[in-house]
Amino acid sequence: GDQVKQSPSALSLQEGTNSALRCNFSIATTTVQWFLQNPRGSLMNLFYLVPGTKENGRLKSTFNSKESYSTLHIRDAQLEDSGTYFCAVNTGANTGKLTFGHGTILRVHP
Amino acid sequence: EAAVTQSPRNKVTVTGGNVTLSCRQTNSHNYMYWYRQDTGHGLRLIHYSYGAGNLQIGDVPDGYKATRTTQEDFFLLLELASPSQTSLYFCASSDVGRDTQYFGPGTRLLVL
Protein backbone atom coordinates (compact mmCIF):
# COMPACT_ATOMS: atom_id res chain seq x y z
CA GLY A 1 0.00 0.00 0.00
CA ASP A 2 0.92 3.63 -0.16
CA GLN A 3 3.52 4.59 2.39
CA VAL A 4 2.74 8.30 2.16
CA LYS A 5 -0.92 9.24 2.00
CA GLN A 6 -2.22 12.71 1.42
CA SER A 7 -5.71 13.98 2.10
CA PRO A 8 -7.87 15.28 0.72
CA SER A 9 -7.03 14.30 -2.85
CA ALA A 10 -8.69 17.47 -4.14
CA LEU A 11 -10.00 20.62 -2.55
CA SER A 12 -11.83 23.72 -3.72
CA LEU A 13 -11.52 26.88 -1.65
CA GLN A 14 -13.03 30.28 -1.88
CA GLU A 15 -10.53 33.11 -1.89
CA GLY A 16 -9.84 34.37 1.62
CA THR A 17 -10.70 31.14 3.43
CA ASN A 18 -8.44 28.77 5.38
CA SER A 19 -7.71 25.08 5.04
CA ALA A 20 -5.41 22.29 6.12
CA LEU A 21 -3.79 19.53 4.09
CA ARG A 22 -2.73 16.31 5.73
CA CYS A 23 0.10 13.88 5.08
CA ASN A 24 0.21 10.54 6.92
CA PHE A 25 3.13 8.16 6.51
CA SER A 26 3.79 4.59 7.54
CA ILE A 27 7.56 4.65 7.11
CA ALA A 28 10.21 5.95 9.47
CA THR A 29 11.47 9.38 8.60
CA THR A 30 13.29 12.24 10.23
CA THR A 31 12.31 14.96 7.77
CA VAL A 32 9.30 16.01 5.71
CA GLN A 33 9.26 18.31 2.71
CA TRP A 34 6.29 20.09 1.15
CA PHE A 35 6.23 21.18 -2.48
CA LEU A 36 3.79 23.07 -4.68
CA GLN A 37 3.46 22.20 -8.33
CA ASN A 38 1.89 25.16 -10.07
CA PRO A 39 -0.49 24.83 -13.03
CA ARG A 40 2.46 25.26 -15.42
CA GLY A 41 4.12 22.19 -13.90
CA SER A 42 6.97 23.80 -11.96
CA LEU A 43 7.80 22.32 -8.55
CA MET A 44 8.67 24.73 -5.77
CA ASN A 45 9.80 23.77 -2.30
CA LEU A 46 7.67 25.22 0.47
CA PHE A 47 9.01 23.68 3.66
CA TYR A 48 11.78 21.42 4.87
CA LEU A 49 10.80 20.14 8.32
CA VAL A 50 12.35 18.31 11.19
CA PRO A 51 9.86 17.56 13.99
CA GLY A 52 8.20 20.82 14.89
CA THR A 53 6.50 23.73 13.17
CA LYS A 54 7.55 26.29 10.59
CA GLU A 55 5.70 29.29 9.27
CA ASN A 56 6.17 31.32 6.10
CA GLY A 57 3.69 34.06 5.36
CA ARG A 58 0.23 32.55 5.02
CA LEU A 59 1.57 29.00 5.20
CA LYS A 60 2.31 27.01 8.31
CA SER A 61 3.45 23.41 8.50
CA THR A 62 3.88 20.94 11.33
CA PHE A 63 5.70 17.61 11.44
CA ASN A 64 4.65 15.28 14.24
CA SER A 65 7.17 12.40 14.22
CA LYS A 66 5.57 10.50 17.09
CA GLU A 67 2.26 10.17 15.30
CA SER A 68 3.77 10.04 11.80
CA TYR A 69 1.98 12.89 10.12
CA SER A 70 2.48 16.38 8.80
CA THR A 71 0.02 19.16 8.08
CA LEU A 72 0.13 22.20 5.85
CA HIS A 73 -2.16 25.07 6.82
CA ILE A 74 -3.11 27.71 4.28
CA ARG A 75 -4.50 30.94 5.66
CA ASP A 76 -6.39 33.52 3.59
CA ALA A 77 -6.15 31.47 0.39
CA GLN A 78 -5.29 33.39 -2.79
CA LEU A 79 -5.81 32.49 -6.43
CA GLU A 80 -2.06 31.96 -6.87
CA ASP A 81 -2.14 29.22 -4.22
CA SER A 82 -3.85 26.94 -6.76
CA GLY A 83 -1.88 23.89 -7.81
CA THR A 84 -0.93 20.46 -6.50
CA TYR A 85 0.65 20.16 -3.07
CA PHE A 86 2.99 17.24 -2.45
CA CYS A 87 4.50 16.04 0.76
CA ALA A 88 7.60 13.86 0.69
CA VAL A 89 9.43 12.00 3.41
CA ASN A 90 13.12 11.21 3.54
CA THR A 91 13.45 7.43 3.73
CA GLY A 92 17.17 6.94 3.24
CA ALA A 93 19.02 8.41 6.22
CA ASN A 94 21.46 10.80 4.53
CA THR A 95 20.86 9.60 0.98
CA GLY A 96 18.22 12.15 0.09
CA LYS A 97 15.80 9.47 -1.07
CA LEU A 98 12.32 10.93 -0.96
CA THR A 99 9.03 9.08 -1.10
CA PHE A 100 6.23 11.31 -2.33
CA GLY A 101 2.54 11.27 -1.64
CA HIS A 102 0.14 11.46 -4.56
CA GLY A 103 -0.66 15.09 -3.93
CA THR A 104 -3.61 17.31 -3.07
CA ILE A 105 -5.05 19.30 -5.96
CA LEU A 106 -6.10 22.71 -4.68
CA ARG A 107 -8.26 25.11 -6.62
CA VAL A 108 -8.86 28.56 -5.21
CA HIS A 109 -11.78 30.42 -6.78
CA PRO A 110 -13.04 33.99 -6.43
CA GLU B 1 17.91 29.98 -4.98
CA ALA B 2 19.28 26.82 -6.59
CA ALA B 3 19.34 26.81 -10.37
CA VAL B 4 18.52 23.51 -12.02
CA THR B 5 18.02 23.35 -15.77
CA GLN B 6 16.87 20.49 -17.96
CA SER B 7 17.03 19.81 -21.67
CA PRO B 8 15.23 19.14 -23.84
CA ARG B 9 11.95 20.43 -22.39
CA ASN B 10 9.94 18.24 -24.73
CA LYS B 11 10.93 15.09 -26.61
CA VAL B 12 9.12 12.68 -28.89
CA THR B 13 10.67 9.37 -29.86
CA VAL B 14 9.56 6.00 -31.15
CA THR B 15 9.57 2.63 -29.42
CA GLY B 16 13.11 1.31 -29.35
CA GLY B 17 14.61 4.75 -29.72
CA ASN B 18 17.58 6.08 -27.81
CA VAL B 19 16.98 9.13 -25.60
CA THR B 20 19.23 11.17 -23.34
CA LEU B 21 17.80 13.68 -20.89
CA SER B 22 20.19 16.26 -19.49
CA CYS B 23 20.26 18.08 -16.18
CA ARG B 24 22.63 20.76 -14.97
CA GLN B 25 22.78 22.49 -11.60
CA THR B 26 24.96 25.51 -10.95
CA ASN B 27 24.97 25.71 -7.17
CA SER B 28 27.69 23.21 -6.39
CA HIS B 29 25.24 20.75 -4.88
CA ASN B 30 26.54 17.27 -4.20
CA TYR B 31 23.35 15.28 -4.66
CA MET B 32 21.33 15.01 -7.85
CA TYR B 33 18.18 13.02 -8.57
CA TRP B 34 16.02 11.88 -11.45
CA TYR B 35 12.26 11.40 -10.91
CA ARG B 36 9.36 10.54 -13.12
CA GLN B 37 5.86 11.86 -12.54
CA ASP B 38 2.81 9.97 -13.70
CA THR B 39 -0.86 10.47 -12.99
CA GLY B 40 -1.86 8.33 -10.03
CA HIS B 41 1.72 7.77 -8.87
CA GLY B 42 3.08 11.15 -7.87
CA LEU B 43 6.86 11.46 -8.23
CA ARG B 44 9.02 8.36 -8.14
CA LEU B 45 12.79 8.24 -7.83
CA ILE B 46 14.62 6.60 -10.74
CA HIS B 47 18.32 7.17 -9.96
CA TYR B 48 20.38 9.51 -7.85
CA SER B 49 24.01 10.43 -7.28
CA TYR B 50 26.23 11.65 -4.48
CA GLY B 51 28.80 13.21 -6.77
CA ALA B 52 30.72 12.91 -10.03
CA GLY B 53 31.13 9.27 -11.02
CA ASN B 54 28.69 8.02 -8.39
CA LEU B 55 25.34 6.38 -9.18
CA GLN B 56 22.70 5.00 -6.85
CA ILE B 57 19.61 3.05 -7.78
CA GLY B 58 16.25 4.55 -6.94
CA ASP B 59 12.82 2.98 -6.62
CA VAL B 60 11.91 2.54 -10.30
CA PRO B 61 15.23 2.01 -12.15
CA ASP B 62 14.22 -0.61 -14.72
CA GLY B 63 14.80 0.55 -18.29
CA TYR B 64 16.93 3.53 -17.25
CA LYS B 65 20.62 4.22 -16.98
CA ALA B 66 22.17 7.35 -15.59
CA THR B 67 25.56 8.95 -15.51
CA ARG B 68 26.99 11.80 -13.42
CA THR B 69 29.86 13.19 -15.45
CA THR B 70 30.65 16.23 -13.31
CA GLN B 71 29.31 17.77 -10.15
CA GLU B 72 27.04 19.91 -12.32
CA ASP B 73 25.77 17.39 -14.88
CA PHE B 74 23.53 14.36 -14.49
CA PHE B 75 22.15 12.45 -17.48
CA LEU B 76 19.28 9.98 -17.76
CA LEU B 77 19.58 7.42 -20.56
CA LEU B 78 16.79 5.44 -22.17
CA GLU B 79 18.52 3.08 -24.57
CA LEU B 80 15.43 1.22 -25.80
CA ALA B 81 12.52 3.52 -25.11
CA SER B 82 9.09 1.99 -24.52
CA PRO B 83 5.64 3.61 -24.40
CA SER B 84 5.54 2.91 -20.65
CA GLN B 85 8.32 5.46 -20.28
CA THR B 86 6.11 8.25 -21.55
CA SER B 87 6.16 10.59 -18.59
CA LEU B 88 7.19 13.92 -17.12
CA TYR B 89 10.79 13.72 -15.89
CA PHE B 90 12.20 15.94 -13.20
CA CYS B 91 15.75 16.46 -12.10
CA ALA B 92 16.54 17.80 -8.64
CA SER B 93 19.57 18.65 -6.56
CA SER B 94 20.41 19.17 -2.91
CA ASP B 95 23.52 20.18 -1.04
CA VAL B 96 23.52 17.13 1.20
CA GLY B 97 21.20 14.15 1.43
CA ARG B 98 19.08 15.49 4.24
CA ASP B 99 18.36 18.86 2.73
CA THR B 100 15.85 20.74 0.64
CA GLN B 101 15.64 19.47 -2.92
CA TYR B 102 15.43 21.98 -5.76
CA PHE B 103 13.72 20.88 -8.94
CA GLY B 104 14.29 21.64 -12.59
CA PRO B 105 11.41 22.62 -14.92
CA GLY B 106 10.83 19.09 -16.17
CA THR B 107 11.07 17.27 -19.51
CA ARG B 108 7.99 15.84 -21.18
CA LEU B 109 8.82 12.61 -23.00
CA LEU B 110 6.43 10.90 -25.39
CA VAL B 111 7.32 7.45 -26.68
CA LEU B 112 5.19 6.44 -29.65
Image: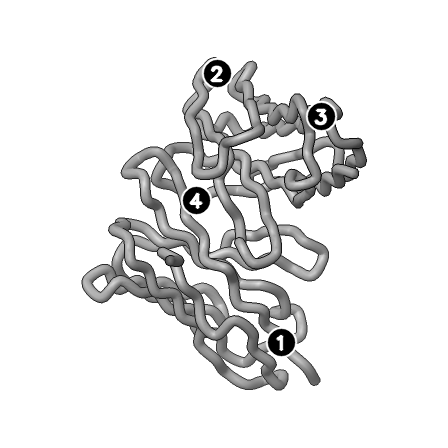
Extreme residue toward the left, this view: A66
**Does dot 1 land on a helix, a strand or a loop?**
loop
Look at the image and tell me whether residue A62 can be seen.
Answer: yes
Residue A39, above or below B100: below
Work out how far the residue at label 4 is from the one at label 2, CA to CA, in angstroms.
20 Å
- Report whether residue B1 is seen: no
Q: Secondary structure at mark 2?
A: loop
Residues marked 3 and 2, same chain? yes
C-alpha span from label 3 to label 2? 21 Å
Q: Which residue is mark 1?
A: A78
Q: Chain of mark 1?
A: A
* Image location (x, y in percent) of residue B106: 66, 42
Disc 2 residue type (three-letter):
Ala
Residue at the disc numbered 2:
B52
Q: Which residue is mark 4?
A: B100
Closer to us: mark 3 or mark 2? 3
Determine the CA span between mark 1 and mark 2.
42 Å
Q: Are marks 4 and 2 on the same chain?
A: yes
Q: Do the dots labelled 1 and 2 sit on one chain?
A: no
Say how many tags the image has: 4
- Circle 2 chain: B
Kind of residue at badge 4? Thr
